[in-house]
Image: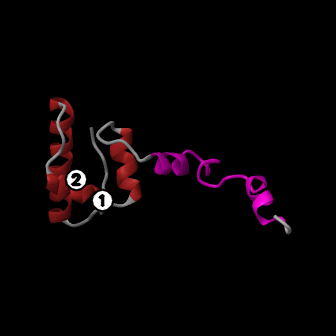
Amino acid sequence: MTTRTGLTDRKGAEMVRLHVEHLLAAKLSGSAPPPTTAIWLTSIPDKLRERLAKAGLIDLPARQQDLTAGGVSGRISPPLHRFKAAVTPGN
């Protein structure tokens, strides 16, 4: 599998390669990735995170899946009628 990272820096690309290898090894062994890779995942751009998820190396958080599926779901932005009774004068 080839994933373009958008990085032009060789050192940065090598770092991505190393973490992707750790993710693949963790997936194949059924274990958690090393702590350094888990921390790295919190700092990568959404686009790279989505590519890793598409390759099956990570799971996207439910909120990010909703946002990348083409819109915001009702769980993130609930309908206003649910709050109407709470702001009606006299309640």
Q: In this view, does 74 lie to the left or right of 48?
A: right
Q: Describe residue 86's horizontal placement relative to residue 59 as left or right.
A: right
Residue visible at 28% across and 42% down in the picture: 2
Q: Which element type, helix, strand or loop, lies under badge 2?
A: helix
Count neighbours of disc 1 (C-alpha within 10 A) and say few if under 14, some if 14 to 19, many if 20 or more: few
Q: Which amino acid does label 2 sit on?
A: Ala
Residue indicated by mark 2? 38
Which contiguous range is marked in magenta?
62-88
Please say if the residues under marks 2 and 1 sit with CB atoms less than 8 Å apart. Answer: yes
Residue in view at x 15 percent, y 45 percent: 22
Does 55 appear above or below 15?
above
The residue drawn where x is 28% and y is 62% is 7
Is 66 included in the stretch rendered in magenta? Answer: yes
In this figure, which residue is indicated by the disc labeled 1? 42
Left/right of residue 86 with respect to residue 46 in the rendered view: right
Q: How far apart are marks 2 and 1 (CA)?
A: 7 Å
How crowded is the residue under tag 2: few (<14 C-alpha within 10 Å), some, or many (20+)? some
Q: Which picture quadrant has residue 39?
A: bottom left
